[in-house]
Image (cartoon, helix red, strand yellow):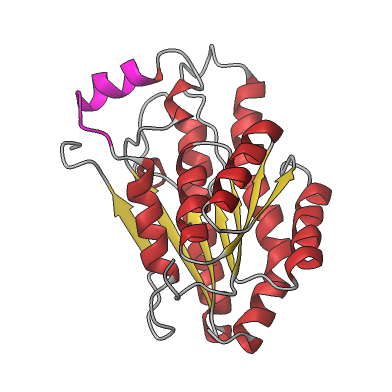
Amino acid sequence: MTENLQKTVAIVTGASSGIGRAIAKNLAAAGSNVVLVARRKQRLNDLATEIEKANGQALPVVADLTSNDEAIRVVNETIEKFGTLDILVNAAGVMLNGDSIETPVKDWDAMVNINLRGLMYLTKAALPHLKESAEKSDRKVSDVVNISSVAGRFAASQVAIYSATKFAVTAATEAWRQEYTRQHVRFTVIEPGKTATELFDHRVGENEAFEKMFGKVEELQADDIANTVHFIVTSPRRMAINEVVIRPTDQA
């Protein structure tokens, strides 16, 4: 393990698969105590076991972050277990795109609730502890990294509500950055392009729709995003990386 995240505590949402899982493993390998948050208990337990076998420390917490009470519980359990919170990575998300007349409203609600409300609730619950960590920890800085999407920069046909949630994440991250930067809580938004995760499996036809728009591309891997998060949170205190756009080389 490297020493740069020793004694830190990180919450990672969406940790049961894809980008969230890769980020959690990366931070744990760097020495952080990682709180794994998602709704699939067995996957979280399996990941916690994997991290602990590699001499890391992980706390699996099953939670539905569309509930503010659940978000508060996640933070409370983190503080009860580890006593502090240094890093929050909001990586949970769902993508249910399609024809706007045919798409059920419940799918739109799911994207708003998971992609935006869950991120809002957990960030709000975590902020007092992140501020305290920035004041008292050896690092003298804390980090919030929000995983958005290139769909949060450019809208596209049949992606209206997904894009709306990701535009909101990007905007909220920048507003929070301005609000807390002088208190040394760094906010970063990462906007990946096509990445090989379960996101494109949430609805039949997502991959086909992407290929129709952009053509076939060599996808990013979840570890590419995890390595970017690692770089962000291990940067010197004087250095705040506000926004990162990552696309596959082949993606126009």
- Residue 248: x and y, percent? 23, 41
- Residue 158: x and y, percent? 42, 23
Q: Seen in the image, is 63 located left or right of residue 231?
A: right
- Residue 197: x and y, percent? 42, 32
> Magenta stretch containing residue 217, yes or no?
yes
The residue sitting at 50% across, 40% down in the picture is 164
Q: Seen in the image, is 251 located left or right of residue 147?
A: left
> Magenta stretch containing residue 85, yes or no?
no
* Quadrant in the rendering for residue 159: top left
Bounds of the magenta span?
207-219
Of residues 49 and 225, which is closer to you in this image?
Answer: 49
How many numbered marks have been drawn onto this rendered protein structure? 0
Q: Main secondary structure of the magenta part?
A: helix
| Image position of 222 with respect to 196: above or below | below
- Residue 13: x and y, percent? 60, 48
| Image position of 118 with respect to 129: above or below | above
Q: Is residue 98 visible?
A: yes
The residue sitting at 69% across, 81% down in the picture is 132
Of residues 169 and 233, which is closer to you in this image?
Answer: 233
Q: Quadrant of the C terminus?
A: top left
The residue sitting at 76% across, 54% down in the picture is 74
Q: Quadrant of the N terminus?
A: bottom left
Q: Is residue 147 visible?
A: no
The residue sitting at 79% across, 56% down in the picture is 72
* Quadrant in the rendering for residue 183: bottom right
